[in-house]
Amino acid sequence: MSAIDYNTMTLDELRRYVLAHRNDSEAFYTYVDRSKVAGRMITIDPRDPHWEEKLDDRLKKIDDRPTI
């Protein structure tokens, strides 16, 4: 079996790969790391009393991004 270079995949290709190979934890963590860098991953702190406002602001920023 040949080794897979996740860095040669686009983020969308890597997402599809992870969904098809759910037991590949290295691919999953690579996808999560790259998603965070790309701004696709939203994290919240439920202890923050303003977490809903921050989430709404973040979602609006995502909605306002230009489409390609």
Image (cartoon, rainbow, N blue to C red):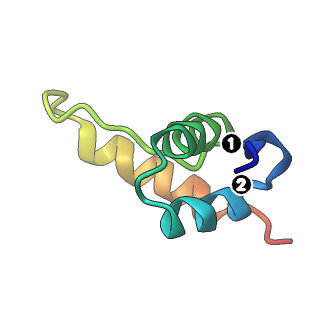
Judge whether 67 appears above or below 32 on screen: below
The image position of residue 34, as x and y in percent, is 64, 39
Picture quadrant where residue 45 is located: top left
Relative depth, front residue between 41 and 3: 3
Quadrant assignment, res 53: top left
Residue at 67% in and 56% down? 14
Question: In the picture provided, is 16 more to the left or to the right than 48?
Answer: right
Residue density around tag 1, few if under 14, some if 14–19, many if 20 or more, within 10 Å: few
Would residue 8 be found to the left or right of residue 26 on screen? right
Element under label 1? helix
Residue 58: x %, y % from top left: 49, 48
Q: Is 25 on the left or on the right of 5, as rendered?
A: left
Q: Residue 61 at x, y = what percent? A: 59, 53
Relative image position of residue 56 (x, y in whole percent) = 39, 54
Instruction: Looking at the picture, tell me which residue is in the foreground, 11 or 23.
Output: 23
Which residue, given by chain and number where applicable, does mark 2 sit on?
11
43 over 23 or under it: above or below: above
**Disc 2 versus disc 1: distance between alpha carbons?**
9 Å
Mark 2 Cα shell of 10 Å, populated few (<14), some (14-19), many (≥20): some
The residue drawn where x is 26% and y is 39% is 51
Q: Earlier in the sequence, mark 2 or mark 1?
A: 2
Asked if the residue at tag 1 contacts the one at tag 2, i.e. Cβ–Cβ closer than 8 Å, the answer is yes
Residue lying at 72% horizontally and 63% vertically, measured from the top left: 13
Badge nearest the viewer, 2 or 1: 2
The local secondary structure at tag 2 comes to helix
Residue where numbered disc 1 is placed: 38
Figure disc tally: 2
Q: Amino acid at mark 1?
A: Ala
Say which quarter of the image contains residue 68.
bottom right
Residue type at numbered disc 2: Leu
